[in-house]
Image (tube, grey):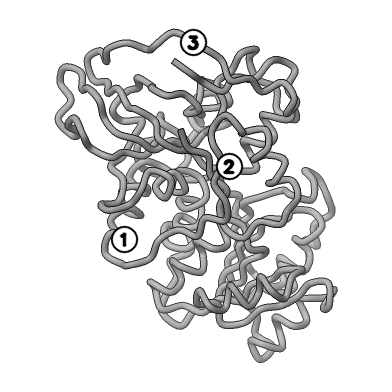
């Protein structure tokens, strides 16, 4: 079968469309899935470009959606023909984060082979059912970006109707934040360097948009829009270069979900301001299988579908990553067989 593999030490030019052995029949407790699609995330890019080292010949991509082809002995949750979507942390079934999810040793496309293959055989607990009526390409957006947004707002943030959420940028997580906020009756302020993207975000349901190039001190604009109080919840994707303004932007007693480090891995934190705001700053990496099941149930109860900016053939994964690095996308970038 075909798979997209990475030659060590990484680099987009070292991605190859390879012929590898078929995984065969599922064993007890396992399922065999024909993968139809995946979606690109910053983590996948870091593995592919060599920023995160991985084993030579690693099959790439964390996200995978497809159709169950066979079920092993003892599997009752799935049947042949079911549409399913993979889990980012297959070892994390439920409950709070614990030592077993430190690092990415069990994450597909990093510590173990990923979903950029035509067929995979995994434990049944490494997948959940996909939303009914969704394409595989749509479902592939759930594993990382969608679930991150869901956990930040619902599991950790406990967002209530009328809450004000600030989300940075218009990538896959931020677009999912807008859609989930709409489900929950919350308001969203979104930032971008593009007025066109801000208008598109408003059409999706964002309440306000802030161009961070026009308003370099965008935290002042957030305070203005919230009558000086600040946002209840902030989805912080930038890291060092944006965290200070996010702390400026949060209300007293508010919640900041640190879900990305797009601007670097280390930097200064205005600790006195954070303490004075009595805000909760929480690091967050995706979520567990139970949360994914809850997210899928919520999606099925609403009419929203993910925003997919562009879809590439799996064989053009290098080109898809190059498009991702351009930063011109709005929503998710996907690949499909």
* SS category of the residue bearing label 1: helix
In three-dimensional space, the C-alpha distance between marks 1 and 3, rounded to whole angstroms, equals 37 Å
163 relative to 228 in the view: left or right: left
Q: Which residue is mark 3?
A: 20
* Tag 2 residue: 40
Which residue in the protein does label 1 denote?
A: 298
Q: Is residue 72 above or below residue 172?
A: above
- Which residue is rendered at x = 58% and y = 62% of the image? 174
Q: Quadrant of the N terminus?
A: top left
Residue at 72% in and 72% down: 276
Where is residue 182, by image quadrant? bottom left
Corner quadrant of residue 234: bottom right
Q: How far apart in space, not on screen, are marks 1 and 2 (Cα)?
A: 23 Å
Q: Report if the CB atoms under discs 2 and 3 are less than 8 Å apart.
A: no
Rounded to the nearest angstrom, the CA distance separating label 2 from label 3 is 22 Å
Q: Secondary structure at mark 2?
A: loop
Q: Residue at x 38, y 65 (%)?
A: 304
How many C-alpha atoms fall within 10 Å of the one at disc 3: few (<14), some, or many (≥20)? few
Quick check: marks 1 and 2 in contact, CB under 8 Å? no
Q: Secondary structure at mark 3?
A: loop
Mark nearer the viewer, 1 or 2:
2
CA neighbours of label 2 inside 10 A, class few (<14), some (14 to 19), many (20+): many
At label 1, counting other C-alpha atoms closer than 10 Å, the crowd grade (few under 14, some 14-19, many 20 or more) is: some
Residue 76: x, y in percent?
A: 14, 30
Q: In the image, residue 88 lies at what x, y percent?
A: 47, 36
- Residue at horizontal 66%, vertical 59%? 236
Q: Nearer the viewer, residue 92 or 330?
A: 330
Q: Indicate the position of residue 254 as horizontal and vertical percent values.
A: 58, 71
């Amino acid at each position: 079968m075909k798979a997209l593999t990475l030659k060590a030490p990484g680099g987009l030019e070292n991605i190859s469309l390879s012929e590898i052995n078929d995984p065969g029949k599922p064993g007890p407790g396992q399922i065999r899935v024909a993968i139809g699609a995946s979606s690109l995330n910053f983590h996948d890019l870091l593995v592919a470009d060599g920023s995160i080292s991985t084993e030579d010949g690693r099959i790439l991509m964390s996200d995978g959606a497809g159709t169950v082809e066979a079920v092993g002995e003892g599997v009752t949750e799935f049947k042949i023909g079911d549409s399913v979507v993979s889990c980012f942390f297959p070892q994390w079934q439920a409950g709070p984060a614990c030592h077993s999810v430190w690092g990415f040793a069990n994450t597909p496309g990093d510590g173990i082979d990923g979903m950029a293959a035509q067929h995979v055989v995994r434990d049944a607990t490494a997948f959940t059912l996909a939303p009914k009526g969704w394409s595989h390409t749509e479902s592939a957006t759930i594993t990382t970006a969608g679930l991150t947004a869901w956990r930040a707002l619902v599991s950790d943030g406990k967002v209530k109707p009328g809450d004000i959420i600030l989300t940075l940028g218009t990538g896959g997580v931020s677009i999912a934040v807008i859609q989930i906020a709409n489900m929950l009756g919350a308001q969203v302020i979104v930032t971008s360097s593009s007025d066109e993207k801000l208008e598109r975000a408003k059409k999706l349901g964002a309440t306000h948009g802030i161009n961070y190039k026009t308003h370099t001190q965008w935290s002042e604009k957030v305070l203005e829009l919230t009558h000086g109080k600040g946002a209840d919840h902030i989805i912080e994707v930038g890291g060092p270069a944006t965290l200070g303004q996010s702390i400026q932007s949060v209300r007293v007693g508010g919640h900041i979900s640190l879900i990305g480090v797009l601007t670097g891995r280390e930097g200064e934190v205005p600790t006195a301001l954070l303490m004075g705001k009595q805000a909760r700053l929480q690091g967050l990496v995706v979520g567990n299988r139970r949360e994914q099941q809850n997210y899928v149930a919520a999606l099925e109860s609403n009419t929203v579908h993910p925003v997919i900016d562009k879809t590439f053939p799996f064989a053009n994964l290098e080109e898809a990553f190059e498009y991702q690095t351009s930063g011109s996308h709005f929503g998710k970038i996907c690949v499909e067989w």
